[in-house]
Amino acid sequence: MVDDSDPPATPRWPHALRLVLFVAVLLTLFYLVAVSKVIDPSGIRAAVSATGPAAPLAYLVVSAGLAAVFVPGPLLAAGSGVLFGPLLGTFVTLGSTVLTAMIAALLGRRAGRDSARALLGADWSSRIDAQIERRGLWAVVGQRFVPGISDALASYAFGAFGMPLWQMAAGAFIGSAPRAFVYTALGASISDLSSPLGYAAIAVWCITAIIGAFAAHRGYRGWRGRRQGGSLPEGEEGPTPG
């Protein structure tokens, strides 16, 4: 007699519970740091200044860790401008941003990738892998241009879906460069926002916001189009654009 009974299905609730706990930890950190402001950036700047010639590297590493626990990036970038000026400060801010993206993505991958894939199933996981391979880098770049989205939260999510670290690093570098200059330059010119540097920073911010809004709208339209196209019966075509 052949036993053709299927093996018992692996319970999914432990994976769901793990993801819920992971999200709860992130939201708690976000509330404590970004809303309640339990961390004082000015005190951190003073401590970094005391390190002397190593201050740029020290601030890069410290601000990367702080951003990963949701200290607002604009405040950290402005502090870089205050400490190091617009040129060196922009490179410090950009290096910190890339390091934050890698830290958050790595933690997101370790904490949530296996559970997310277990809940999504093999088919959807394969589709996501294909999309990451084709468009992962530009998804990270595009997210950096969209206003109002926490870069750290997005990096945790990207990591949970299996985004490779090289795509996170390259995407964060490309997509964050304009904003790194904007907030660092504003910090460097905080005593005189009417200076040419201040006006240049504001102009770059406006251009970046417009590009981000356009990219978000275009991405939403593309997502809706794919959903509508996927809902058609096999062999039928959608309406031809006219």
Image (spheres, grey):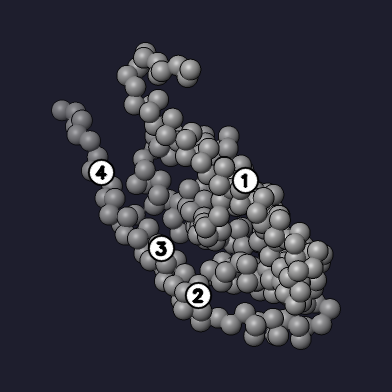
> Given this view, does label 4 or label 2 mark the residue nearer the observer?
2
Q: Secondary structure at mark 4?
A: loop
Horizontal and vertical percent for residue 26?
Answer: 44, 66
Q: Earlier in the sequence, mark 4 or mark 1?
A: 4
Query: Looking at numbered disc 3 in the image, what kind of residue is underneath it?
Result: Phe
Residue topped by disc 1: 211
Give the number of callouts. Answer: 4
Q: Residues within 10 Å of mark 4 (few under 14, many from 20)?
A: few
User: Please, is residue 71 above or below residue 51 in the view?
Assistant: above
> Given this view, does label 4 or label 1 mark the residue nearer the observer?
1
Horizontal and vertical percent for residue 221?
Answer: 47, 35
Labels 4 and 1 touching (C-beta < 8 A): no
In this view, the residue farthest toward the front is 194
Q: Secondary structure at mark 2?
A: helix
Residue topped by disc 2: 33
Quadrant of the rendering where the N terminus is positioned = top left
Distance CA(mark 3)–CA(mark 1): 32 Å
Side (left or right) of 36 relative to 188:
left
